Image (spheres, helix red, strand yellow):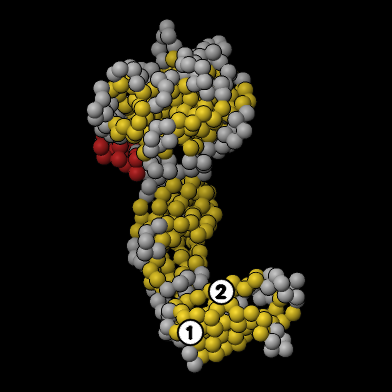
């Protein structure tokens, strides 16, 4: 047996850590505070705020974009899949561009010119991998209050649905990853309203506002647990920040120092502390065992594997234990692997959609068998398919055949030269009747036969 130990890479907090190191935002006592990133539409800056109290967590940082003069920004949002911020950047001459925004330096990397200067709000659907955009009420027909998707490599937009007429002014959208709906705010007080938009049917459902009155919504972002952080615009007074539930109830947080547009939310909580992560090899199977010291909001673990080419793929999932002050042990077995070198990692996901990776520090090497072997098929009895595994210690011609009770050959599953290694063959008996059958392997001077039962 071989054993490899834990190497933790915590990606759910990588942006938060970046902001701490780059901007010196928080003391050690406040590093768990979730933060909101926002932009100023008139003074081209990006700034971080404490999401709970709306107190500054960084100084305002000027926005710049090579080759352009930035005059402002109308939206910023976070892509939780590639861990990048995207913004709608206003430039001199009146154009609006889609760009990747570095909130630590203010540097924007231009993606492309948007098809309309009306686009002013965006949100990312982390379930479908779609970035949505909506045009403002003052924009041209066909863009105003209409929902689009945008290509994150070219900035090309595609019309999806609309117009949506929940209100007379404003067009802010935010995706709720818990109920899988897009929320849309529009209108001015006292008629300010919100609605949900189904991302599949695009049907809209009005949600009556309640709680603290608010004016035209300027920015919104879903922060989990059925709650949004929202900023509004009051033309004759200070702008405010609120929390608004998915049911429409608004609670005042406090004033904002400027007209805060777009909003991007980061929850820095790393909800699981792993105390160990090891792997053991038995033949062609790898068993992963890991243990937690504590858990917070832990939905579970995706198990991912990569081979020499470095492409990661999900191979399984193990449910977590939510919130627990005590540790828990977990295990997962990856069976019937071919000879080769593999890497494994855990993608721990919390109920808010945040995630972090834990990597094994060493590669797992499935070597060459030391002897010939033919395993009992599994499952057995079976209907209609079963797997037959065999091991080859040297290269050579292999024959694997199926026989009935009388010894009549029914079919050949394998008849070719194979390199040394572990193999698994699927046998589908959908064309056969119930009964006992035999399978025989011949390789070099090795021959073995085993019995299996088909039950229909």
Q: Residue at x 44, y 15 (%)?
A: 233
Q: Helix, strand, or loop for circle 2?
A: strand
Compare residues 343 and 71 and report the one nearer the observer: 71
Q: Residue at x 54, y 87 (%)?
A: 442
Tell me if residue 159 can be seen. Answer: yes
Compare residues 157 and 207 and report the one nearer the observer: 157
Q: Residues within 10 Å of mark 1 (few under 14, many from 20)?
A: some
Compare residues 124 and 254 and report the one nearer the observer: 124
Q: Position of residue 434 (x, y in %)?
A: 75, 76
Q: Residue at x 62, y 73 (%)?
A: 427
Is 261 left, or right, of 353 in this rendering?
Answer: left
> Would you name the residue on which mark 2 appears?
425
Identify the image quadrant of residue 363: bottom left
Q: Which mark is residue 397?
A: 1
**Above or below: residue 326 compared with residue 12:** below
Tell me if residue 212 can be seen. Answer: no
């Amino acid at each position: 047996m071989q054993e490899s130990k834990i190497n933790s890479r915590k990606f759910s907090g990588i942006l938060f850590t970046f902001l701490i190191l780059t901007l010196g935002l928080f003391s050690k006592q406040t590093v768990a505070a979730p933060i909101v990133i926002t932009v100023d539409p008139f003074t081209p800056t990006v700034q971080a705020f404490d999401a709970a109290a709306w107190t500054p967590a960084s100084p305002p940082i000027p926005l710049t974009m090579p080759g352009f003069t930035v005059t402002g920004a109308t939206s910023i949002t976070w892509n939780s899949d590639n861990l990048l911020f995207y913004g709608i950047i206003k430039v001199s001459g009146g154009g609006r561009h889609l760009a990747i925004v570095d909130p630590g330096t203010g540097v924007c990397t231009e993606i492309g010119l948007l098809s309309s200067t009306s686009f002013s709000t965006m949100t990312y659907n982390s379930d479908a991998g779609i970035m949505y955009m909506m045009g403002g009420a003052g924009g041209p027909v066909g863009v105003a209050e209409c929902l689009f998707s945008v290509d994150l490599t070219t900035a090309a937009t595609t019309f999806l649905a609309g117009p949506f007429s929940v209100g007379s002014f404003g067009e802010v959208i935010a995706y709720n990853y818990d109920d899988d709906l897009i929320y849309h705010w529009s209108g001015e007080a006292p008629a300010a309203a919100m609605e949900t938009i189904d991302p599949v049917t695009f049907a809209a459902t009005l949600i009556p506002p309640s709680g603290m009155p608010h004016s035209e919504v300027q920015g919104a972002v879903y922060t989990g647990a059925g709650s949004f952080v929202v900023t509004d615009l009051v033309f004759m007074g200070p702008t405010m920040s609120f929390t608004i539930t998915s049911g429409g109830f608004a609670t005042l947080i406090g004033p904002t120092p400027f007209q805060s547009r777009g909003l991007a939310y980061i929850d820095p909580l790393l909800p699981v502390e792993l105390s160990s992560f090891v792997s053991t090899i038995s033949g062609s199977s790898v068993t992963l065992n890991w243990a937690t010291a504590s858990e917070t909001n832990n939905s579970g673990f995706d198990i991912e594997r990569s081979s020499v080419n470095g492409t990661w793929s999900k191979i399984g999932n193990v449910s977590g234990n939510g919130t627990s002050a005590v540790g828990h042990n977990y295990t997962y077995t990856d069976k019937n692997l071919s000879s080769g070198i593999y890497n494994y990692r855990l993608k721990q996901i919390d109920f808010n959609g945040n995630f972090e990776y834990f990597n094994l520090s060493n590669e797992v090497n499935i070597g060459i068998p030391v002897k010939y072997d033919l395993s009992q098929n599994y499952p057995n009895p079976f209907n209609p398919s079963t797997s037959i595994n065999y091991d080859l210690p040297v290269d050579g011609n292999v024959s694997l055949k199926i026989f009935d009770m009388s010894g009549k050959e029914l079919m050949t599953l394998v008849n070719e030269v194979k390199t040394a290694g572990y193999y698994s063959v699927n046998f589908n008996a959908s064309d056969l009747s119930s009964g006992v059958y035999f399978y025989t392997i011949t390789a070099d001077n090795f021959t073995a036969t085993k019995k299996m039962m088909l039950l229909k």
